Amino acid sequence: MTTTTPFVDLGTEEVLLDVIDCVATLTLNRPAKLNAVTSRMSAAIVHAIGWCDRSDSVRAIVVTGAGDRAFSAGSDIAELDRYATPWDFRNRTDYCDAIRAARTPTIAAVNGYALGGGLETALSCDIRIASSTASFGAPEIKLGWIGGGGMTSFLTRAIGPSNTAYMTMTGDRIDADRALGWHLVSEVTEPSGLISRAWEIAATIASRAPIAAETAKINLRAAYSMSEDKALEYERDLQTICFATEDAAEGRRAFAEKRDPVFRRR
Ligand code: COA
């Protein structure tokens, strides 16, 4: 097993990026403030995701929070007073956009509170798993506003309109069991097993053909942003692109030779 920890200067210690084998772990590291995201952290997240996408060796990204209380309690509320105008606020860097735009597959390991922007961060990842102590909420309504990082769009797709209305209109949290029942997360683990399970899923994705994994991600987005007939056509185009890769030829060869394939992102 090769281990590499890249030197990536993210400009703050409050976001950490580690790479082991082909799996990057992006950790929101501000546990005393429940990993609430400042603008500096937001810039670091954008930088980290860009670094992972540009790295040929990173095949999956696990996103998690430091400490045992929070994944993230959302945007730093104290900092919101510092925007000079609502337009400055409107045009701030959105860390959720960056995570959602990642070419690399992403897995949220939700280890505690996932609130506001924290929930949107999890929703921006491709796969979500949670510890049994996690809770999820859209508490902005309690402060006088609503989420703006994709809360309603992505929550609706995950849990349906009635459950979304419940969360966004009451602001009340739901626990991990209910999140599982509502299909907000794919799995619930014991707290001690969460990160290793997220790494296990990431390692499995990392072992697959990278172009196919990234294309599966593009296809997933197409499935819910295009009309059904266009999405189906697009899926066939994406399938053909994958089919034309050296990795697909290697996959078929390895199958015939009864060995594990060696994929090279070609
Ligand atoms: N922004 C900035 N600071 C935050 C924060 C946020 N979103 N969420 C928590 N914190 C800070 C608290 O101010 C506190 O800091 P302090 O110790 O310097 O006073 C620290 O994190 C711990 O939080 P605390 O409120 O003391 O913990 P708690 O267990 O009593 O309550 C929560 C936990 C999550 C219920 C509560 O912190 C909360 O409601 N946070 C806001 C969540 C939210 O509205 N998010 C959407 C933001 S748009």
Image: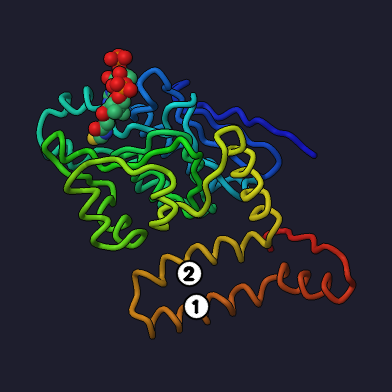
Quadrant location, ligand no. 1: top left
- Mark 1 residue type: Glu
Nearer to the camera, 265 or 59: 59
On the image, numbered disc 1 is attached to which residue? Answer: 235
Q: CA distance from mark 1 to mark 2?
A: 6 Å
What residue sits 50% from the left and 62% below the top?
217
- Residue 251 found in image quarter: bottom right
Tell me which corner region of the image, top left, top right, bottom left or bottom right, holds residue 134: top left
Please tell me which residue is depicted at 52% across the width and 28% down the height of the picture: 16
Q: Are marks 1 and 2 in contact (CB under 8 Å)?
A: yes
Left or right: residue 80 compared with residue 14: left
Mark before the other along the chain sequence, 1 or 2? 2
Furthest toward the right, the residue is: 257
The reply, left or right, for residue 60 in relation to residue 253 is left
Which residue corresponds to the image point at 75% horizontal and 74% vertical from the top-left?
A: 249
Residue toward you, 106 or 262: 106
* Label 2 CB less than 8 angstroms from ligand 1: no
Q: Is residue 142 visible?
A: yes
Local secondary structure at mark 1: helix
Label at residue 251: none
- For the point 55% across and 30% down, which residue is it? 8
Q: Amino acid at mark 2?
A: Asn
Q: Residue 132: x percent and y percent?
A: 49, 39
Disc marking residue 219? 2
Q: Position of residue 180 (x, y in %)?
A: 44, 52
Residue 145: x and y in percent read 13, 40
Q: Quadrant of the C terminus?
A: bottom right
Q: Residues within 10 Å of mark 2 (few under 14, many from 20)?
A: some
